[in-house]
Amino acid sequence: MKKVKAKKHLGQHFLTDEHIAKRIADSLTNHQTNVLEIGPGMGVLTKYLITQQDINLKVIEIDSESVTYLEENYEQLKGRIILGDFLKMDLHDISTETLSIIGNFPYNISSQIFFKVLDYKEQISEVVGMLQKEVAERLAAPPGSKKYGILSVFLQAYYNVEYLFTVPEHVFSPPPKVKSGVIRIIRNQTQKLDCDEKLFFRVVKTGFNQRRKTLSNSLKSIQFNREKIPDMDIFSKRPEQLGVQEFVELTQFIEANLQQN
Ligand SMILES: C[S@@+](CC[C@H](N)C(=O)[O-])C[C@H]1O[C@@H](n2cnc3c(N)ncnc32)[C@H](O)[C@@H]1O
């Protein structure tokens, strides 16, 4: 059958290197869960996943031309293909049990995919994904690094994040303008942070919105009693210098000193 014509608005860059495809599929450590592949395209990863007996695979693809291609080329995918938008679907409809996610993600929505993973962190135990190298590096960046940002803190609060390897432009059709990176995130033991989580997210976001300022300056829009600030060393730091635990401590302090408007 003729190949799927790449559609730019869907972020379609098809991986053509079988060796790399297998390496990505093999990076998934937990096979005892349901596995959802996002954006299978023409199935370059999918074919290495469906042959693994212990994987209960489903795939979600937004492009109907790709879905037709998959149906016609992979008999084993019968009943496993969902035509739809990953960002809009309720993952509990796939399974109420633990879920692992894998995919060569469309780069234009890769951050949104990880925000959605956080929404379902009780269910999602592992993600292996290829995304734009720079974004992959950001998610895995440790505190102190220039690349460390909002999504790095949020993900690292609940997942161990590993940058696995880099993939060059020329192994895709059509080639993207930038290199890609593969990361793996595995759920850690944290069920709930030791602070008000909503406030934690607000503190992290507000801090990084002005990442060059010290937290005592960048958090001015949050109304809390600032009298005790001088006692807290954390406020003299910039957000990129704080690990998850320090953000938790910062949130606890603000929570204890919140002022009602
Ligand atoms: C980078 S391509 C990867 C295709 C294939 N897995 C490969 O490696 O060659 C991204 C795929 O995600 C699909 N896609 C884009 N947006 C999507 C969405 N919101 N939900 C599900 N699939 C999506 C595209 O149609 C495309 O097939």
Image (cartoon, helix red, strand yellow):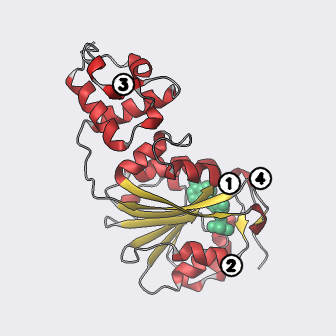
Q: Which quarter of the rendered picture does the C terminus lie within?
A: top left
| Picture quadrant of ligand 1 | bottom right
Pointer 1 residue: 10
Residue at the far left: name it: 256
Q: Secondary structure at mark 4?
A: loop
Q: Is residue 232 visible?
A: yes
x, y (%) of residue 227?
25, 13
Q: Secondary structure at mark 2?
A: helix
Q: CA distance from mark 2 to mark 1?
A: 22 Å
* Mark 4 → mark 2, Cα distance in angstroms: 21 Å
Crowdedness near tag 2: few (<14), some (14–19) or many (≥20) residues, C-alpha within 10 Å: few
Q: Is residue 150 above or below residue 45?
A: above
Indicate left or right for 49 with 201 as reference.
right
Per the image, the residue denoted by label 4 is 177
Q: Position of residue 39 (x, y in %)?
A: 59, 63
In the rendered image, which quarter is residue 143 located in?
top left
Report the amino acid beneath label 2: Glu
Q: Residues within 10 Å of mark 3 (few under 14, many from 20)?
A: some
Kindly report the distance in space between the C-alpha atoms of the residues bearing marks 3 and 1.
42 Å
Residue at (30%, 17%) from the top-left corner? 230
Answer with mark 4 or mark 2, whichever residue precedes in sequence. 2
Residue that numbered label 3 is attached to? 235
Image disc number at residue 31: none
